[in-house]
Amino acid sequence: MAGETDRSDRFLASGAGQIDVTLFPCYDVVLRLYLYADSKQRSFNAVYVIRIYQGVLLVSFIQRCILVIALNASLLCAATTSIAGTMVSNLAEYNNFGMGTFGLYEHASSFTTDSIPYHLNSITIAAYANADNTQGTLKLYWDLMGKPGALFAELGTKSIPAGEQMVTFSAIDTTLNSNTTFWVSVSSPGDDFAWTGTTSTSEVSAGSWTIGDQVFNRIFPNPTWAAVDLGSPYESGKFAVDATDARRAGDLNADGFVGQADLTKILEHWGQSVTPGSWPLGDPTGDGFVSQDDLNLVLGNWGLGTPAIETVPEPTTLLMMGIAGIGLLAMQRRQLRAK
């Protein structure tokens, strides 16, 4: 032990003391390399290894500085593009019929989301009230084999004045799954409220959302939903869904963390024309071209989220291990020659 301590002291005196061992864990690799060489009574230039190591650390430090500068610059100019607003609506279609509640009926029409999850902001319906302070209640149901199933969310009850109007119900902490059908239902405790319907099959969608063409209703207290037949093959309540993209900005691979994997997707498709808004193809800004704006969006959110737990050695550690391996191999070859 005393001899090894003496060799450690000589090693530190040779120049290793210039390294802050609290910052660089692979310092131990160099120390062990020197002790091995010294124990074999072989000539080995520890100071030379130290200089190589310090050069590696300097390069690593410069790379990290460049990355920090790039990230901070991107934070200033990062695009904040996010899919938000009215995702689907048929409110502009003509009115064909009114679905009166009469205090007993609950009517439902469906919509289907596209390939990404969304935070629901609100749902607006076209309604008619015969008297002031008429109450209307809006709920969302899961789909069950093409008809309303279990309750998904309640958006509350609104009191509205008499006349024809748009009524907006706000949602709180409600996330809509991707590629999923939901049913919007409207009911009222009184007989002065009606949900306006249309037989038009047209709708306006910001993505690939759709509105179903079949109305269902049920009469309290009967829990069974039945299809409404008004003599047209297409019937729907009039409504619009406002939502915001629920994905984390910059998380192109949807793993919950903005990092190297997302940057790789940008680089793989750099300068290419892709499907507009395709995150897996590197177009989070949605302009159909992978460019600086997409890179800014990733870098501007760099490090956000929770990374997967992985054991990955530091690059400098790997390099120093490589240097140590080369040194040990060289010593072994000299030993063979000496024999």
Image: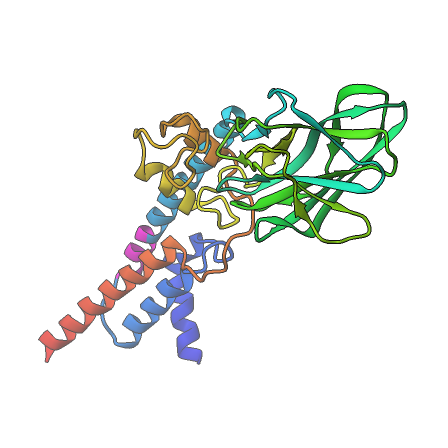
**Residue in view at x 58 percent, y 40 percent:** 246
Q: Quarter of the image containing the N terminus? A: bottom left
Q: Residue 335: x percent and y percent?
A: 15, 75
Q: Quadrant of residue 200?
A: top right
Q: Is residue 202 above or below residue 25?
A: above
Q: Residue 10: x percent and y percent?
A: 38, 65
Q: Residue 217: x percent and y percent?
A: 71, 43
Identity of the residue furthest to the front in this view: 231
Q: Quarter of the image containing the C terminus? A: bottom left
Which contiguous range is marked in magenta? Answer: 45-52
Query: For this rendering, which residue is in front, 182 or 38?
Result: 182
**Residue in view at x 76 percent, y 42 percent:** 106
- Please, which colouring scheme is shown? rainbow
Q: Quadrant of residue 270?
A: top left
Query: For this rendering, which residue is in front, 174 or 123?
Result: 123
Q: Is residue 51 magenta?
A: yes
> How many numbered marks have been drawn onto this rendered protein structure?
0
Q: Is residue 138 above or below residue 1?
A: above
Query: For this rendering, which residue is in front, 25 or 155?
Result: 155
Residue 145 as seen in the image, left or right of residue 310: right
Residue 196 as seen in the image, left or right of residue 335: right
**Residue in view at x 57 percent, y 45 percent:** 181
Q: Residue 322: x percent and y percent?
A: 28, 61
Q: Is residue 240 magenta?
A: no
Majority secondary structure of magenta residues: helix
**Residue in view at x 51 percent, y 33 percent:** 300
Residue 255 as seen in the image, left or right of residue 143: left
* Whether residue 207 can be seen here: yes
* Whether residue 15 can be seen here: no
